[in-house]
Amino acid sequence: MNSIDSSIIKDKGQLYGLVVLRVLIGWHFLYEGVSKLINPYWSSAAYLLDSKWIFSGLAKTIVSNPTLLGISDYVNMWGLTLVGVSLLLGIFSRYTTLIGMGFVLLYYFFAPPLLGLEYGRPGEGSYLIVNKNLIEACALWVLYSFPTSHIIGLDRFFNQSESN
Amino acid sequence: MSDKSNQPAENNMDRRDLLKGLATVPVFGLFLVNLWRKIRRDTLMKSNLLSDLVQEKSAPAVISGLSDSRHLNIGIIGYGGRGSHLVRGAGFATKGWTDTVAENARKNKLDKGFATFMSQEDLNCSLVGVCDLFDVRANQAIDASQNETRPGGKPQGAATRYRHYTDLLADDKIDAVIVATPDHWHSRITIAAAKAGKHVYCEKGLTRTFDEAVNVYDTVKETGITFQLGHQNRQVEANEKAKQIIKQGLLGPINLVEIATNRNSPWGAWVWGIHPEGNAKTIDWDTFQEPSPNKIPFGEEALKRFFRWRMWFDYGTGLSGDLLSHDFDAINQMMDIGIPKYASSTGGIYFYKDGRDVPDVWNATFEYPDKDLTLLYSATLSSNSPRGNKIMGHDATMQMGGQSGGGSVHGFIVTADSESTQYKDRLESGVINPKYPIYTYSPGSKQIDGVTSATSRYFANKGLLYTYREGKRVDPTHLHIKDWLDSIRNGSQPRCNIEVAFHEAVACHMATESYFQGRRIEWDPVNRKLV
C-alpha cells in the first residue's frame, strides 16, 4: 500500500463517501455470489449463451464444455462472494478491487450494450454503450486509486506496521 | 488522512483503531440478517407454491441399460424425411447425414446433433429390409443400414431392397416394420404387416379415412401385434408432469382447452423440395397412387404430388392428420379425453393458392358433454404468432408450447386465476399472485418456480437450460422407437398403442368429415360409426 499516498484523501467527507461506495459494492458482489451459491440450479450458461461481440466465441466454447462451464460457475459463485466479503469488511481490499473490476469488465465485454446488438434476456434499464457493469468497474477503479480499507476496515490491523 | 500520525507508536491498537478497523462489520451482520430473512421468505413461498400444491412425484423414467434380450430385425417402408428420422431413432443414419452433423458440430460447438445421435442407446436391432418407391431414398436407406458411424458400432449387415411392401413383409427374417409412407398407404401396409405377424410402428395420422382406422384397429387387436403410433410427444416428460398436475386438480374444473398451430413458411405449408433426380424412371408413380381416390398420369403435377403429398386429400388429411393429431394426442395423454361426442370444423384455402385442396386455415371444435369439456383447435399456415396450447381451469390455467411452437419439451407454466375458489385464501393473503406462475416446469431446471428470477424463468421457458445444462439431450423419437422395441420384447403395450391411436384417428376424421360435409359430426360409439 505504501506506493500510494493516502493523504490524497483530504477530508472526512471524501473518506466516508469512498467507504460507503466500497461497502455498497461489496454488498452487491456478496449477494450476487451468495444467491448463486444457494441456488443449486444456477448456471452461467444462460448469460454466456446470450453473449454477443468479441467474446461470444469464447462463451460458446465454455458452454459447450461441461468442465469449462463448471469452472466458470465455480469461479463466478466464489469469486463474487469473496470479493464481496473483502470489500464489505475492508480486508485485502486493494487486491480485490482489481479482481472485482475484472469480473464486471468481463460481464460487460461478454454482453456490451452496443448499437446493433440484441439480447434475448430481459433488461432492467435502458443502456447505450454504457451500462451499470461499466460504471461499477469504474467505481472499483476509483476505489483502487483511493484505498480506504487501511483506514476504515480490517486492513487497518494488518497495516499498523506499514503506517508507522 | 494520516490520522494515526499523532498516536504514539507503542499504542497502535487503541480503542479508536479497533473501532475504525471493525467499523463495517455491523454492515456485514446486517447483510447476514437480511440474507437469512430472504432465504426464510423464499422457502415459505416455495412451500406454499410447490410442496403444498403439487405433490412432487419421482423423476420421469430415464433410459435404461442396453436392450440386449433379443435382437430384432426391422424393415422400413417409406424412407422420406420422417422415415429417415425414425430409422435414426433406431440407430441408423446415412453416411451423408453423419458426416454433415459431425462437420456442423466441429464448426459450431453448441450443435449437439451428432453427440445426441451417437449417445443414443444401442437398441440391439438391425435394419434388414427397405422399401421405397423412389430409388434415391431406397439407396439412402441401404446406405444407412451399413454406416458404421452409429451408437453400438458396426451394423450386422446391409439391408435388402424390396420393390413392393408385400415382398418385404414376406421376408421371414423381419420381425417388425416402420411405416412412414404418406397416409394413404398406412392402413393397407399396417393391416398386411399385422397379418404377416410383423410388429408395426406407424407414423401419424393413423389413416387417411375413418373406415381405414376402424379396419386397422380391428386387425391390430385380432393379430395381437405390438403397435405404436408415431406420436413421440408420449415420451416427453413435460407432458407426463402436466398430467400429474391436472390429475391432482391443481387447475380446478376444466371446461375449455385451446390448441393451436401457427406456421408461416412454404416448408411449414408442405411446399417441400422436388428432388432433382425424381422422374418416371426413379419413381414408381403407379404404385404410389394406387390407393388414392383420384389418379393422374405421371408428369409435372405427379412430381409435385409425390414430394408434397400433404397438400392433397388424395394422400392425407392436411392439417388434421399432420398437426391437429399431435396436439390432440398430447391433450389426450394429459387428460385422457378419448373420442369426442361431436366435432365440427370450418376453414379454407386463404393463402396458398397453389393448387392444393387441403385448407391452410382451419378451425375445429370437439365437444365432450360427459366431461363438460370443449376442445378447440385453431390453425393457420400464414402466421407465426405463437399461441401455444392452453388448458383453462376455474382455478388456474396451464400454458404450454404447442407442436408448431417448438414442441412441449420446453415445459409449461401454471398461473392461478384471479377468481379462483381453490386459491381464494392464498390470493387474498398475497401468497399467490395471479400475475406470476404458481408452477413452472422446464426439463432440466426443476427448481424454476414463482420465486426465482425473471431471467432464469425466461431462459428456462426458452428451453435453453434443458438443452445445454442438465444431463444429456435425448431425442423423443429415439425414445418412442425404443419404447416400441422394448414392448415387442416384453409383450407390454407401448405408450401410443392402438387404443389411444384410435382416439386420435377418430377425432381427426370427425373434424375432417365435418369440413367436407359442412355439418357437425357425431360419434356413435356403439356401432362405431360417424353420424
Image (cartoon, coloured by chain):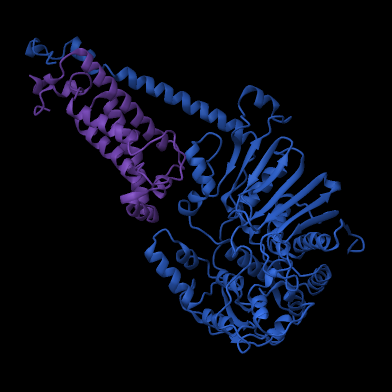
Chain colours: A purple, B blue
Left/right placement of residue A133 relative to residue B488 reads left
Q: Quadrant of residue A133?
A: top left
Asked if residue A102 is positioned above or below residue B91 in the image, the reply reads above
Residue A10 placed where, x, y %?
15, 16
The quarter in which the N terminus of chain B is drawn is: top left
Residue at (70, 66) in percent of width and height? B204
Q: Which quadrant would residue B88 be assigned to in this image?
A: bottom right
Closer to us: B270 or B420: B270
Work out whether residue B493 can be spotted.
Answer: no
Left or right: residue B178 compared with residue A17: right
**Residue shown at 44% from the left, 42% from the top:** A42
The quadrant holding residue A100 is: top left
Residue B180 vertical placement versus B328 (above, below)? below
Residue at image coords 34%, 33%? A132
Q: In this rendering, would A92 be left or right of B232? A: left
Q: Give the vertical position of B451 relative to B466 (above or below).
A: above
Q: Position of residue B473 (x, y in %)?
A: 50, 58
Q: x%, y% of residue B329?
A: 71, 57
Q: Nearer the viewer, residue B421 or B36?
A: B421
Can residue B119 be seen?
Answer: yes
Left or right, residue B4 beside residue B91: left
